[in-house]
Amino acid sequence: MVKKLSEMSLDELWQLFPIVLKEHDPSWQEWFSDEKAALEQLLPERHKISHIGSTAIPGIWAKPIIDILLEVSRGSDMEIIKKRLTAAGWICMSESGARKSFNKGYTENGFAERVFHLHLRFCGDNDEIYFRDHLRHHPKAAKEYEQLKLRLWKEFEHDRDGYTNAKAEFVKKYTQIEISRRYNNGNR
């Protein structure tokens, strides 16, 4: 009998769902577009839905997991949105203050064909946009990020937190550069 995901330890989950990197796949944009349309149907209120993460950066290797940032207005009731998302099959993975993270495509037998992470935030809590945009406009920095990810891949294959933490300084550096650039250009 296969254990339910909710019954698995973190170590068991990391074994079942290792870090896997793949060459950029143009169909990732289609996956995002399809899921964005589904979210717009599920949440008819006006929200900002953005494709973030490495799959949103053309030309670099990435985990084949589509990261989506869902920004809602400050007056939105996140608990109602959470209920709608979970009723539609999203699994709430974490909640920290005004941030909630969900996933879809994780099964007791491993990854589904399409896998998504959804980051629910209030408008403006979106540093991932700055990082994405910086890498999109600076191919050299994007390739540096790709090389960092490839170096860390096998070391952290079964340790997602370690993998994320090992990239954090790089992400923070280029996020700050992009925020500063926009602020200095009056585009914040």
Image (cartoon, rainbow, N blue to C red):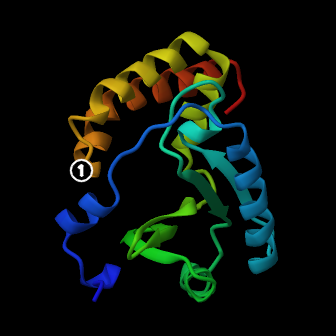
Q: Residue at x 56, y 52 (%)?
A: 67
Amino acid at the residue labelled 1: His
Residue sitting at 55 percent across and 81 percent down? 82
**Picture quadrant where residue 69 is located:** bottom right
Asked if residue 54 is positioned above or below residue 79 in the image, the reply reads above
Mark 1, residue position: 158
* Image height of 184 relative to 5, above or below: above
- Residue 119 shows in this picture: no
Mark 1 secondary-structure assignment: loop
Q: Nearer the viewer, residue 181 or 118?
A: 118
Q: Position of residue 168 (x, y in %)?
A: 33, 35
Q: Quadrant of residue 132?
A: top right
186 left or right, relative to 89 = right
Q: Nearer the viewer, residue 37 or 176?
A: 37
Q: Picture coordinates of residue 89 (x, y %)?
A: 58, 82
Apparent side of residue 13 relative to residue 56 in the rendered image (left or right): left
**Which quarter of the figure has residue 157?**
top left
Q: Quadrant of the C terminus?
A: top right
Residue visible at 25% across and 59% down? Answer: 15
